[in-house]
């Protein structure tokens, strides 16, 4: 599998991805199985700093498994078996002796918003507190900054003490984004974040992601091909556990593909 | 066609049936309260000296000059239950956390089954264990003359209450959605931090209910306490002292009393007292749990 390196002009504004530099993530021969049933077969790809990397594909094509492997969430699922190598900043993630420290550098946004059963404030302050930040003023500053970045501050600033789970679906999803940002991650993983979010909020979050690209690297798994087109610099197409295609997003949408199935999926002939 | 068919009548009948089932709890609890009160009320309003009942330790219902001081019995029940909880609550919550959060697969299933089997052991068997195993063990280990007392009964009661507390607490932990755990772990929290900061706060109502059920279990237990506590009227000053519980007193003496006698009435007064205390514990628990829920 050859990585297609794009011509300059990124799909969306802001900083350009750093294609010339060593990649943030290098995946080599990644194979994932659940109780012996393969979910992802022999994936190799690189993800570069300040890139929004899109992954599209129908259900059960292994997109979520890929994200879980990046975050080493396989420990959570006893039946999940991961082979191959994933390197973050050149270091194999399985060589990390403290998996919790690894995870704290990677922000994750799940398909359905998970407001922890805590107040809005405590949701966002959770990760800073884990890092040992105790001072109220410092926490206040982090909470406000992250909620502002996630385009939620104005809506919740008067009810930081109410339960996060009482917010609307779209607000909760932005809360989870704020929470992920509070980790000050270098990598943000988003798994079909717009499933439970209305279109207006989706567009607001997409704007947020575009801005965030100057600070971090984003892997965006989405079931909406148009979302990948709007956001991703490069896109990979996963189908039934295989990576069928990887390339500059615009190229894929303009029909410059190596496999006809890609065009078929993008044009909605199957899903 | 507007006609009441079989399904309509079945629906009505089913509703009536479950209604009876639903209110039967109220009927039974009222019935028991009325019965216990009726049997004890004549004595409470008549010969009973309330001051003596609550402050004296002289429980001599069969003496020529009978006295009915129940303080030692109350202290006996409280000390045994308290001691049991002291050792059983951490044990049970620990067991629930291990089964619910850490154990997987066969270990988990085996532990669950074993804990539930523990709950099925009859109380008289526990009492037997207290008398014939714990008693000599305590005498030997601590070099005391008698091994039947607060320590023995407390340990036995704690072991008896542990399965129900463990099971209810584990259910409460399981009711916390896995998505919370995943989200917290994705934030870089360790397993222990997830448990401490997310799982326990989210399940505190259930955990509290588990503990209170355990207290209720200990408070009401009779046979095992009767056998393991030494059944001696005494204000305990050390864990090795023998005590006598309210429940054990009723069980041991009721058979020997004459229906309607003062002794009979006095035992029912103990029953009223037990009933009220249990009622207050449950009511407090309910209020506390509701308070937490509202917050």
Image: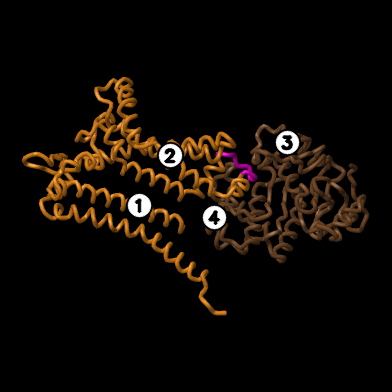
Chain colours: A brown, B orange
Distance of label 4 from label 1 (alpha carbons): 29 Å
Residue sitting at the far front: B6
The answer to which of A51 and A202 lies nearer the viewer is A202
Local SS, label 3: helix
Binning the other alpha carbons within 10 Å of mark 3 as few (below 14), some (14 to 19) or many (20 upward) gives many
Q: Which residue is mark 4?
A: A119
Q: Is residue B205 above or below residue B94?
A: below
Q: Which residue is mark 3?
A: A93
Q: Which residue is mark 1?
A: B282
Distance of label 4 from label 2 (alpha carbons): 34 Å
Residue A262 x/y as whole percent:
87, 53
Residue B236 x/y as whole percent:
23, 34
Q: Is residue B7 above or below residue A219?
A: below
A94 relative to B235 in the view: left or right = right
Q: Is residue A241 visible?
A: yes
Q: Which residue is mark 2?
A: B163
The residue drawn where x is 48% and y is 37% is B95
Local SS, label 1: helix
């Amino acid at each position: 599998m050859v990585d297609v390196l794009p011509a300059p002009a990124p799909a969306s504004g802001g900083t350009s991805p750093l294609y010339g530099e060593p990649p943030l993530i290098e995946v080599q021969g990644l194979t994932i199985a659940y109780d012996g049933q393969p979910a992802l077969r022999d994936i190799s790809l690189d993800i570069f700093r300040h890139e929004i990397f899109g992954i599209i594909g129908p259900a059960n094509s292994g997109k979520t498994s890929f994200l879980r492997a990046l975050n080493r969430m396989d420990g959570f699922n006893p039946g999940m078996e991961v082979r191959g190598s994933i390197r973050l900043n050149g270091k194999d993630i399985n060589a990390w002796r403290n998996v919790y420290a690894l995870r704290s550098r990677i922000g994750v946004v799940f398909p359905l918003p998970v407001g922890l059963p805590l107040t809005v404030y405590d949701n966002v302050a959770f990760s800073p507190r884990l890092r040992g930040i105790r001072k109220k003023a410092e926490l206040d500053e982090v909470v406000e900054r992250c909620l502002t970045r996630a385009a939620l501050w104005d809506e919740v600033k008067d009810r930081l003490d109410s339960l996060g789970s009482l917010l609307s679906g779209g607000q909760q999803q932005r809360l989870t984004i704020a929470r992920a940002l509070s980790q000050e991650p270098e990598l943000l993983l988003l798994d079909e974040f717009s499933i439970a979010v209305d279109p207006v909020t989706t567009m607001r979050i997409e704007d947020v992601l575009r801005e965030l690209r100057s600070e971090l690297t984003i892997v965006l798994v989405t079931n909406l091909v148009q979302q990948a087109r709007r956001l991703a610099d490069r896109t990979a197409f996963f189908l039934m556990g295989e990576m069928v295609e990887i390339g500059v997003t615009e190229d894929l949408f303009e029909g410059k593909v190596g496999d006809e199935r890609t065009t078929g999926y993008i044009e909605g002939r199957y899903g | 066609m507007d006609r009441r068919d079989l399904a309509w009548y079945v629906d009505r009948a089913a509703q009536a049936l479950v209604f009876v089932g639903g209110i039967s709890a109220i009927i039974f609890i009222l019935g028991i309260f009325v019965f216990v009160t009726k049997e004890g009320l004549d004595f409470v309003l008549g010969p009973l000296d309330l001051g003596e009942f609550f402050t004296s330790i002289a429980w001599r219902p069969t003496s020529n000059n009978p006295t009915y001081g129940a303080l030692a019995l109350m202290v006996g029940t409280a000390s045994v239950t308290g001691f049991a909880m002291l050792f059983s609550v951490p044990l049970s919550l620990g067991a629930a956390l291990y089964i619910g959060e850490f154990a997987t697969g066969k270990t988990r299933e085996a532990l669950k089954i074993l804990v539930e089997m523990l709950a099925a052991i009859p109380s008289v068997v526990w009492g037997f264990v207290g008398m014939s195993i714990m008693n000599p063990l305590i005498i030997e280990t601590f070099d005391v003359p008698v091994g039947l007392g607060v320590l023995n009964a407390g340990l036995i009661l704690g072991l008896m209450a542990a399965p129900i507390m463990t099971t209810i607490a584990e259910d409460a932990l399981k009711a916390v959605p896995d998505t919370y755990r995943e989200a917290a772990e994705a934030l870089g929290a360790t397993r222990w931090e997830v448990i401490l900061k997310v799982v326990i706060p989210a399940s505190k109502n259930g955990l509290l209910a588990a503990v209170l059920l355990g207290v209720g279990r200990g408070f009401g237990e009779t046979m095992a306490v009767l056998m393991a506590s030494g059944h001696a009227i005494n204000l305990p000053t050390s864990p090795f002292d023998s005590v006598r519980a309210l429940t054990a007193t009723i069980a041991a003496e009721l058979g020997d009393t004459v229906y309607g006698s003062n002794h009979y009435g006095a035992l029912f007064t103990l029953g009223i007292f037990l009933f009220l205390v249990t009622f207050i514990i449950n009511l407090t628990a309910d209020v506390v749990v509701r308070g937490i829920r509202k917050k």
